[in-house]
Amino acid sequence: QVQLVESGGGLVQPGGSLRLSCAASGSIFSINAMGWYRQAPGKERELVATITSGGSTNTADSVKGRFTISRDNAKNTVYLEMNSLKPEDTAVYYCNAVILTYRYDPGYISWGQGTQVTVSS
């Protein structure tokens, strides 16, 4: 059983910054891609950013230049540095990871429980 636990959400003023963390624990052989998604009230979940095990990243146009994804493979942790936050960034942020539990495992996607980010004055 693998768990992803997010932390770092909260209330911040427009223009402020937050850093989200997501740590994976449990029966893990390795982790392929990791990512952050968000879901605002009344909207569908959308991609924010992803990062491969080698460090290649993909970032949504809506946050490019403001958000940075990174990871620490030794800690099985992915981060999302969010700067210049806007009210439209308000959402529940979820992390996910492609988990391999043994060497030849095709892998499966595990999701965290989500952390609330609210940008408001």
Image: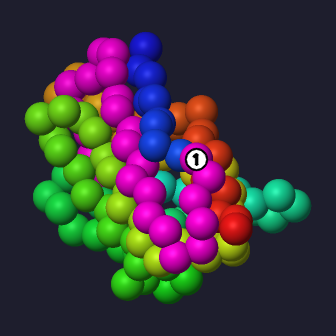
Amino acid at the residue labelled 1: Gly
Most prominent secondary structure in the magenta stretch? Answer: strand
**Residue occupying image coordinates x 87% and y 61%:** 42
What SS does tag 1 mark?
Answer: strand
Q: Is residue 109 visible?
A: no
Q: Nearer the viewer, residue 52 or 101?
A: 52
Instruction: Using the image, determine if residue 2 lies above or below residue 44.
Output: above
Please count the marks in the image.
1
The answer to whether 3 appears left or right of 23 in the picture is right
Is 27 covered by the magenta stretch?
yes
**Mark 1 surroundings within 10 Å by alpha-carbon count, few (fewer than 14), some (14 through 19), many (20 or more):** some
Residue bounds of the magenta highlight: 10-33
**Residue occupying image coordinates x 41% and y 78%:** 66
Task: Give the residue at the far front of this rendering.
Answer: 121
The quadrant in which residue 102 appears is: top left
The quarter of the rendered structure image containing the C terminus is: bottom right
The quadrant in which residue 47 appears is: bottom right
Reading the image, the residue beneath label 1 is 10
**Residue occupying image coordinates x 60% and y 40%:** 114
Q: Nearer the viewer, residue 63 or 105?
A: 63
The answer to whether 78 appears left or right of 43 in the picture is left
Q: Nearer the viewer, residue 97 or 117?
A: 117
**Residue occupying image coordinates x 44% and y 64%:** 17
Query: x%, y% of residue 40?
Result: 75, 60
